[in-house]
Image (tube, helix red, strand yellow):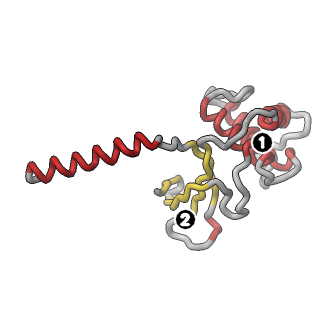
Amino acid sequence: MYVQAEPATTYNVAVSGKVMNSGVPLTLEAAYLYTQFRDGTLAGHDYTVGDGRADSARSLQAAIWHVQGQGSDLIDLLNPNPPWVPMGAGSDGALLAQLFIDEAMAPGWISTGHARVLNLYSWEVTSCVDNQDMLGLFAIPAPGALMLGAIGAVLVCWSRRRSGC
């Protein structure tokens, strides 16, 4: 599988349960936050297109990095280098990121569910300069669905042979 991005870069993709460069497994908390976000049920997240959505996304990204162990200081995670618009400890973005973290840390989420890490690495470049990770949700097909798919493929091949195609 591969992903194409802008500017025109094509990435190979390996689906994994671990972050590529560190080898750290996807945490339950990060999987929870991403799943709730994708389901449209993450409390406090602004899903309306506009500045509020961009601010929510920034807070969510910082929260995911934090629960994934990418940094201990939430303010540093909210203010990457170079920072967009600096956020302080009492800012709305910092409070929202902490709300996301608190929700993810609440008991009850016991597995990563269908959340997986997409380890992206550049198609053209062999160095790790252009490597990155993304999160995604993947449905794991039931064994019965796999069996039905295999039977369907066999029937298609059989019918094509009989018809001379």
Return the x and y of residue 55 as percentages of the image width and height: 73, 35
Pointer 1: what residue? Answer: 63
Q: Are marks 1 and 2 in contact (CB under 8 Å)?
A: no
Residue depicted at x 88% and y 49%? 73
Give amino acid for label 2.
Answer: Ser
- CA distance for labels 1 and 2: 26 Å
Q: Is residue 93 visible?
A: no
Residue depicted at x 69% and y 64%? 21
Against 65, residue 11 (above or below) is below
Q: Residues within 10 Å of mark 2 (few under 14, many from 20)?
A: many
How many marks do you count on the picture? 2
Dividing the picture into quadrants, the one containing residue 91 is: top right
Return the x and y of residue 123 as percentages of the image width and height: 50, 66
Residue lying at the far bottom of the rendered structure: 126
Q: Nearer the viewer, residue 130 or 25?
A: 25
Residue depicted at x 71% and y 55%? 25
Element under label 1? Answer: helix
Q: Is residue 162 visible?
A: yes
Give amino acid for label 1.
Answer: Ala
Element under label 2? Answer: strand
Q: Nearer the viewer, residue 49 or 67?
A: 67
Against 7, residue 151 (above or below) is above
Left-right relation of 89 to 77: right
Residue depicted at x 91% and y 38%? 89
Against 13, residue 93 (above or below) is above
Left-right relation of 144 to 48: left
Pointer 2: what residue? Answer: 122
